[in-house]
């Protein structure tokens, strides 16, 4: 029986909020910079020189839109990320898999208070490595941790 810990819903919602805020700010600054004639006249001197506020409102929208696209791409890359604990191994990604035989210990002292546990394991070359897994990144870690502990101890 495999236990799946999907990418955290909290982070997915935060990405949506970041993208929304960036788009709202881009639209607001573009409106004030290009379409709001009262704002433009208020921030332009009698000689026709624009003050820094108007310059910012005219130049920032493309950067804000680019930032929204960058956040959307980053979120899209992380969207399907998940941890799978099956019968033989802990699968963190397509490239990173930890067999239960290679796990030396699981440090879960900070899991209740800080929401993460650390898996200490040996890689294929025999080198000791640590992997910190946080419930701020993945949901359903309680079930994954319970399965890990049962596989290691029994």
Image (spheres, rainbow, N blue to C red):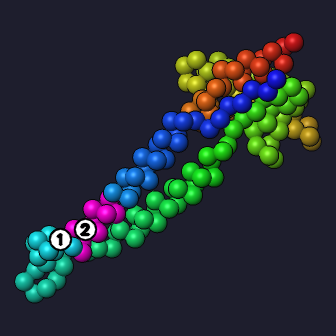
Q: Main secondary structure of the magenta part?
A: helix
**Residue bearing mark 1:** 36
Q: Position of residue 90 (x, y in %)?
A: 80, 32
Q: Nearer the viewer, residue 116 or 80?
A: 80
Helix, strand or loop status at disc 2 = helix
Query: Would residue 70 be found to the left or right of residue 110 on screen?
Result: left
Name the residue at the front extreme: 1
The residue that mark 2 highlights is 31
Q: Position of residue 40 (x, y in %)?
A: 16, 74
Give the residue displayed 31% in from the left and 63% down from the top: 27
Report the disc number at residue 93: none
| Residue 48 in sight from this viewpoint | yes
- Circle 2 Cα neighbour tier, 10 Å, few/some/many (<14 / 14–19 / ≥20): some
- Compared with 133, 96 (above or below) is below
Bin the neighbour count of mark 1 within 10 Å (Cα to Cα): few under 14, some 14-19, many 20 and up: few
Q: Earlier in the sequence, mark 1 or mark 2?
A: 2
Is 67 colored magenta in this rendering? no
Q: If the image is split into quadrants, where does the C terminus sit?
A: top right
Q: Position of residue 120 (x, y in %)?
A: 78, 29
1 and 2 marks in contact (CB < 8 Å): yes
What's the magenta region?
A: 25-34
Residue drawn at x 80%, y 46% is 94
- Judge whether 72 appears above or below 107 on screen: below
The residue located at (32%, 59%) in the rendering is 25
User: Within the image, what quadrant is residue 9 found in?
Assistant: top right
């Amino acid at each position: 029986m495999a236990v799946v810990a999907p990418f955290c819903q909290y982070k997915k919602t935060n990405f949506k909020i970041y993208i929304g805020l960036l788009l709202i700010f881009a639209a607001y600054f573009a409106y004030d910079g290009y379409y709001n004639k009262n704002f433009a006249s208020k921030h332009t001197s009698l000689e026709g020189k624009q003050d820094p506020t108007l310059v910012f409102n005219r130049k920032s929208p493309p950067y804000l839109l680019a930032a929204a696209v960058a956040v959307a791409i980053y979120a899209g890359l992380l969207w399907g990320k998940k941890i799978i604990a099956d019968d033989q191994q802990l699968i963190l990604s397509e490239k990173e898999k930890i067999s239960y035989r290679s796990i030396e210990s699981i440090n879960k002292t900070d899991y209740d208070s800080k929401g993460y546990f650390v898996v200490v394991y040996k890689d294929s070359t025999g080198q000791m490595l640590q992997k910190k897994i946080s419930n701020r990144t993945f949901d359903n870690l309680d079930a994954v941790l319970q399965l890990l502990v049962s596989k290691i101890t029994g």
